[in-house]
Image: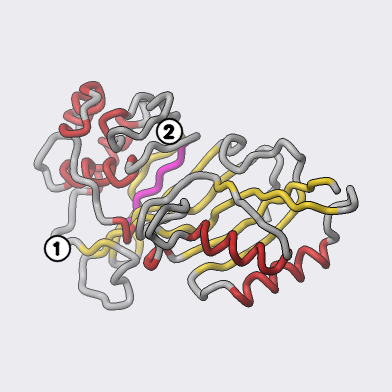
């Protein structure tokens, strides 16, 4: 017997889950996916995700890897992989969907090989029952220009201890932000941010801080002092999870699909 490593691409509505990662006494996306894969492939399967999302956070694009014990060195054909995708989707709940499964090198890693991750945070301003749970409703429209000025300042830094949840046991709080920008969309606004990695709760804390700027409670330049303090208590609140989406994860060996 030998092992073949596969990447699986999926999307999920995080409303009913306590995030991606398996945990005791709570239902996670990873737990449901592992069980579904094991059922279809008829062997125990343990997935490793590209990261972890918090309770209630959604993902439009998420990758994980897993190993399959097999008697041949040949990976699945395109047709077989497509059939497995259909089989898994047939037993998964409707809020988790598999897009693709493809073979990768034995050392390929969904988390450590990712070179860029992108998130969106959605905000709307009028009561809309169809956005409840998928966007954060604000009463007052903030100043977008001021928020983008502050967002540009954030891209000048790499140490984001001030936006990180405490006691996360990571080796470093450094991240390289490639993009941070607010855009107007329909009756709301969307924050786009991309970086090589993110700390736990980082995007929601950044949004909460930028909203303070947009409400003119602090000046854009005050963001510098917040970041340089490396103190989470100096930053803004963590905004609700419902508006946050992981939208893209990039790898050097994965082409656009």
Residue at the (42%, 38%) spot, across then down: 198
Q: Earlier in the sequence, mark 1 or mark 2?
A: 1
The residue drawn where x is 78% and y is 52% is 69
> Is 160 on the left or on the right of 29, as rendered?
left
Which residue is under mark 1? 139
User: Residue 121: x percent and y percent?
Assistant: 35, 54
Place of residue 20 in the rendered image (x, y in percent of width and height, measured from the top left) = 46, 54
User: Which residue in the rendered view is the most extreme toward the top?
Assistant: 228
Whether the magenta-drawn stretch holds residue 151 is answered as no
Q: Is residue 191 above or below residue 91?
A: above
Q: Residues within 10 Å of mark 2 (few under 14, many from 20)?
A: many
The image quadrant where one finds the C terminus is bottom right
Q: Which residues are magenta?
A: 190-195
From the viewer's side, name the closer residue of 21 and 179. Answer: 21
Q: Is residue 146 shown to the viewer in this render?
A: no
Residue drawn at x 36%, y 25% is 156
Pick out the residue farthest to the left: 217
**Residue 41: where, in percent of width, then height?**
73, 64
60 in relation to 203, above or below: below
């Amino acid at each position: 017997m030998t092992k073949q490593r596969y990447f699986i691409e999926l999307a999920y509505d995080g409303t009913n889950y306590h995030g991606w990662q398996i945990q005791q006494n709570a239902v996670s996306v990873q737990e449901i996916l592992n069980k579904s894969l094991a059922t279809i492939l008829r062997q125990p399967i343990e997935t490793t995700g590209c990261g972890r999302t918090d309770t209630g956070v959604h993902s439009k694009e998420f990758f994980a890897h897993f190993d399959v014990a097999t008697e041949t060195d040949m990976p699945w054909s395109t047709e077989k992989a497509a059939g497995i995708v259909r089989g898994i989707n047939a037993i998964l709940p409707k809020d988790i969907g598999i897009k693709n499964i493809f073979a990768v090198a034995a050392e390929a890693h969904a988390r450590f090989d990712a070179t860029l991750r992108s998130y969106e945070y959605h905000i709307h301003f009028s009561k809309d029952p169809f956005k409840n749970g998928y966007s954060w409703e604000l009463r007052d429209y903030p100043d977008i220009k001021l928020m983008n000025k502050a967002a540009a300042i954030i891209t000048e830094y790499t140490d984001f201890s001030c936006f990180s949840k405490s006691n996360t046991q990571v080796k470093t709080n450094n991240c390289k932000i490639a993009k941070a920008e607010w855009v107007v969309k329909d009756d709301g606004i969307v924050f786009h941010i991309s970086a090589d990695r993110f700390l736990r709760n980082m995007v929601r804390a950044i949004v909460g801080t930028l909203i303070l700027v947009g409400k003119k409670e602090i000046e854009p330049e005050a963001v510098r002092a917040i970041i340089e303090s490396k103190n989470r208590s100096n930053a803004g609140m963590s905004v609700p999870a419902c508006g946050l989406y992981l939208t893209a994860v990039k790898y050097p060996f994965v082409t656009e699909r």
